[in-house]
Image: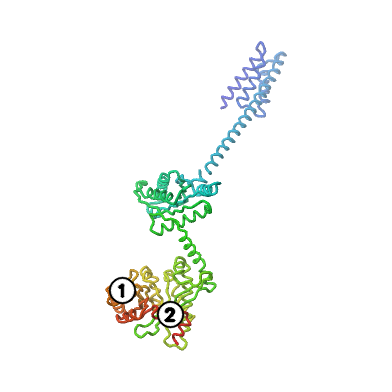
Amino acid sequence: MTQAQLEALLQRLTERLAVALRAEPFDLRIGQQVGAELVAAHIASAEGLGRTIEVIQLRLVRDLGLVADDVEDRMARLLAAVATGYARALRDRTLDEQEAIRRAAMTARNQAERALRDSEARFRHQATHDPLTDLPNRTLFTERLSAAITEPGRGTDRLGVCMLDLDRFKVVNDSLGHQIGDSLLVCVAQRLRRAAGEHLVARLGGDEFVILVERTGCTDDVVKVAEAALAAVSEPAVVDGHELSVSASAGIVERQVAGTSPGELMRAADSTLHWAKAAGGARWSLFDADRNRRELARYALSAAIPTALERGEFYLDYQPLASLRDGTLLGVEALVRWRHPEFGVLRPDSFIGLAEETELIVRLGGWVLAEACREAESWSAGHDDAPFVSVNLAVRQVHRPGLVQEVRDLLRQTGLPPERLQLEITESTLMRTAEEPVRALRVLADLGVRIAIDDFGTGYCNLAYLRDLPVTELKVAGEFVAGLRAPATDSASRTDERILASLVSLAHALDLTVTAEGVETADQAERLRAIGCDAGQGWHFGRPAPADQILARLS
């Protein structure tokens, strides 16, 4: 209250007390009401009651001149009534405040409990469902899959899992943004839910989805679901004003419940999905146990390469490269072998591709290069015309920044003359080689190292392109030479011979020597010699053999 409002209130209460003192009959309730009004007006400090009684007594007794005995008696009783009313009102107010606090605390507790329940529920609309698409997530899908496998009485049932992944979805995100990509995922999720019908559809993450088909009768039951899902996804979609065409790949696995596990099923479906992707996408692939075993074996071989290098399980054989003019040994190609403790001797086609898929080819290729240089240098003793050694370089090796220094160090450490080392790179590798690797090859060529193009004719390279590259030799692919096994009167054989003759002629015009691969017969060798081919490699000149047999041939 303002000062004026406070004075008006106190004036009114004082006048009521003054009237009560002189009123007949004398009513003490007025004093109690005045005490209550003081509390109601929040005049309830520690000094409030005492100061009030003091002021009332002075005001009414001294200022009004009320000194009669009966008035003093009434004054005492009236002031006691004021104190009583004041105390009761203060007590009631305190109890009301306590009750209000209790109710507020109860309301707050109820609200907190309700918020906790809502939060727990949301944590559970988040623990089992994908927040973007509202589909079940990996956790819920795994629970359902586990229940379908482990529930009593389900051992003889069959079930299927169809794992889907959008093709080239990254292009959408990169070109149109993640917001459009998310909207597309929501659209795809809705289509999959409709296409799958009663079957559980879940989002595993990213653009990967999965469908659980329970109690199947055969593989076709899952295939039909997969085909319906792929068809639904492939329909054109308009997302935020963008018309998008999207496709998906699917991996299908269907089997009896007994003897399997959720993890095994998901791994099988995932592997099969990768098969569909590798085949070009926009299709489904069915799990093949034999193929899966082969894939696992390939992976096991790849993982074992580092240990095999440490244990010395790799070794080199050498295949002769002979002059077609007089049959002399010009060089040998180093071919790596793996003496595997379990599978026996493995040829390069069993593991080189695996190593090339990872950085392992750099380590393995480095070992081959070093071992070939070391053994080739030992052939020089007593042999002025010792052959050169030819070593294949993988794409990753060609692109290594330290290739030149690696070769320099090997030549210095082994003492092998640069002209007795030939590095073979494939035609496809050469075509996609950037300027820096080409510069490295030029430096090596300037050192005297021979540079050869392996399997020429199987890629996209042309002879004119070779004019600006540091290449000294072409090794013509065996596919062309194979046609020369047929009689010279055969029209196809004559065509292959004319193609080879043109290649040889053009290569010589560029000062390149030509080696024909895959020469298996004397007739092939003679026909190649007749068209001017410089050298041949193949079983006719010798099969791959250890280094000691190369030494014996030199002797």
Task: Please name the amino acid that badge 1 sits on.
Answer: Leu
Is 150 displayed left or right of 504 in the figure?
A: right
Please identify the quarter of the rendering in which residue 543 is found. Answer: bottom left
Alpha carbon separation for disc pair 1 and 2: 25 Å
Q: Residues within 10 Å of mark 2 (few under 14, many from 20)?
A: many
Residue farthest along the top direction in this orientation: 24
**Where does residue 506 sit, x and y in percent of width and height?**
29, 77
**Where does residue 221 sit, x and y in percent of width and height?**
43, 49
Q: Residues within 10 Å of mark 1 (few under 14, many from 20)?
A: few
**Where does residue 531 sit, x and y in percent of width and height?**
29, 80
Q: Which mark is residue 389?
A: 2
Q: Residue 174, can we see it?
A: no
Task: Look at 47% across and 87% down and name the residue there.
Answer: 381
Image quarter where the N terminus lies is top right
Q: Secondary structure at mark 1?
A: helix
Q: Which mark is residue 463?
A: 1
Task: Look at 48% across and 53% down and name the residue there.
Answer: 255
Report the coloring of the rendering.
rainbow
Say above or below: 289 vs 30.
Answer: below
The one nearer the camera, 489 or 453, is 489
Q: Residue 128, can we see it?
A: yes
Say above or below: 119 vs 479.
Answer: above
Task: Look at 34% across and 84% down and name the residue there.
Answer: 325
